[in-house]
Image (cartoon, rainbow, N blue to C red):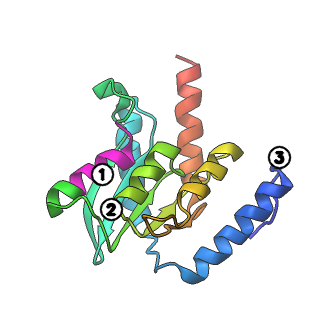
Amino acid sequence: MKVIEPGQDGNIAALRSSFHVHFLFCGGTMDNHYFDHVYELALKAYDENEVPIAAVIVKDGKILASAYNHKEKDQCCTSHAEILAIEEASHLLHNWRLEDCDIYISLDPCPMCASAIKQARIQHVYSALNNSDSSNIELVEKIFEKDHTNPSVYFQSNLDSERFKQLLNSFFEKQRNS
């Protein structure tokens, strides 16, 4: 693992490095094939002119819920993939507590989605691509820490970065050229 990536602040890199080491040893078992499903969903979002972000919630080795961004379709700022997947999983389980669940996402969550993940008691977050915004990284890591009400959330990022980075770059280039 690189300690400092190009253009990254050294303090953030050190924080991120220790954060990931903690979770690599304490976290659950990640299964990379779920990122294939996340990628297929992200492609659907891309085709529908939505930012190609997708999420899959897994429980007991099975996909429980999946979603991709619907902000444009729904004209709603909270229609993020993670929120929609959490809603679907909660509905299926008849419980807002998604304990013993993991979530696989195409990009590190925003603070809103990180808060929803933590409130839902999702145990592990596996992200294909890290968010390049250092303030987002700091906020999300703070949200995922243990507090007086909720346990910490195990978080790993940049686990399948190349294809997701290419997809996001292609989407935003398409947006700029249209």
Q: Vertically, is 133 above or below 91?
A: above
Inspect the image, locate mark 3, and give the three-letter code of the amino acid beneath it: Gly
Q: Main secondary structure of the magenta part?
A: helix
Separation (CA) of disc 2 from disc 3: 32 Å
| Front residue of 9 and 104 | 9
Question: Is label 1 in contact with label 2 (beta carbons under 8 Å)?
Answer: yes
In the picture, the disc for residue 7 is 3
Q: Residue 178, image x and y in percent?
A: 52, 16
Disc 1 crowd rating (10 Å Cα; few below 14, some 14-19, many 20+) is: many
In the picture, the disc for residue 57 is 2
**Does 145 appear in magenta?**
no
Inspect the image, locate mark 2, and give the three-letter code of the amino acid beneath it: Ile
In the picture, the disc for residue 43 is none
Closer to the N terminus: mark 2 or mark 3? 3
Q: Residue 51, image x and y in percent?
A: 46, 35
Is any part of residue 77 visible from this angle? yes
Separation (CA) of disc 1 from disc 2: 7 Å
Q: Which residues are magenta?
A: 79-89
| Front residue of 103 and 38 | 103
Numbered disc 3: secondary structure = loop
| Front residue of 42 and 7 | 7
Q: Residue 124, image x and y in percent?
A: 45, 69
Separation (CA) of disc 3 from disc 1: 33 Å
Q: Vertically, is 174 above or below 13?
A: above
Inspect the image, locate mark 1, and give the three-letter code of the amino acid beneath it: Ala
